[in-house]
Image: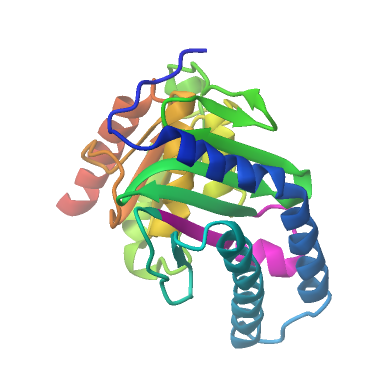
Amino acid sequence: MGISSPTINFPVDETIKRIEYVKANAMGIIHEAKKIQREVSTIRSDTDADEKERIDAADGKLGDILIRFLQKSFPKDGIVCEDKPPIDGGEFKWVLDPVDGSMNFVRGLPLYAISFGLEHRDTPVGGVVIVPPQESVYSAVMGEGAFKNGEPIVTSRVSELNRAIFSPNLPTKRAHMIQEIMADLSGFLTYARSFRRTGSFVLDVCFIAEGVMDAIWEKTVKHWDVSAISVILSEAGGKLTDLNGVHYYTGLPELVASNGVLHSEILNLLKTVRSTVSRN
């Protein structure tokens, strides 16, 4: 497997130390996540508000555990965590998503992930994604390759849309964009082989990184959704950009993640089908 060369200067040894610390404690994190999921998934919500409250409570509880865990060994690092006040720090910053796939989490479905992005001077340089139900750990440091449970991973080499497995864009709040979504789906239904969707953007991108899926396009992604997997995917040979091919950075409203080989063709297809919506 080819290892990419870093495009920025950053303290590699300090980055590796932090990533290895998370990996070494992954089983403890998995245990805590499974325990919280058992607690919240035994309750059935009668309303959307009830379910949202349980999602927020689960995110918050696991987020507190992760923050304490990081501060114990790296008290000078900054931390950004979904639904938590940011913690200022030095040149290193952790970007956390305690539960990506939170609806799955509270329903008891085994499809969610915990994301640890590590940034140096606001640039992603490392990442760990823990998938508790499968006890899987994905990791990468810029320039050092990507791994799953310690074994190297690479993206697929599928180069034709008719052989590709995609994860479609289905944002929760989609009524106002339904024409665009239907145009996207019709285009890929015409040319792609098949669809798969876990309900966790982070998990789907990890599947692309290890070569079992080929691409995903997604709206309304947040900083904590993308920080870790941006490094994991690129180190595995994939690409993560907006619809104009601009590489990931904080704040992009829509992203395409792919095995790299298919990327240009996917962008062209999305532009083509959306142009039909704007003309109608």
Is residue 200 visible in the rendered image? The answer is: no
**Residue 107 x %, y %:** 73, 68
Foreground of the two, 274 or 50: 50
Identify the residue shown where x is 48% and y is 75%.
84
Q: Is residue 109 in the magenta section?
A: yes
Residue 160, compared with residue 271, is above or below; it is above
Q: Is residue 148 left or right of residue 117?
A: right
Quadrant of the image occupied by residue 90: bottom left
Furthest-left residue in this view: 279
| Point 53% across, 57% down: residue | 74
Tell which of 218 and 63 is nearer to you. Answer: 63
Q: Position of residue 232 (x, y in %)?
A: 49, 35
Q: Is residue 244 above or below residue 177?
A: above
Residue 234 in the figure: left or right of residue 1 = left
Residue 153 appearing in the image: yes
Residue 206, image x, y percentages:
56, 38
Q: Nearer the viewer, residue 122 or 191?
A: 122
Q: What range of the chain is rendered magenta? A: 93-112
Above or below, 257 against 199 in this view is above
Q: How many marks?
A: 0
Q: Quadrant of the C terminus?
A: bottom left
Above-or-below relation of 123 to 199: above
What's the residue at 41%, 72% (across, down)?
A: 86
Front residue of 278/220: it is: 220
Q: Is residue 31 shown left or right of residue 136?
A: right
Q: Quadrant of residue 160?
A: top left
In the rendered image, which quarter is residue 48 located in?
A: bottom right
Residue pictured at 69% horizontal, 64% vertical: 105
Q: Is residue 122 magenta?
A: no
**Rendering colour mode:** rainbow
Task: Report x, y in % for residue 71.
Answer: 56, 64
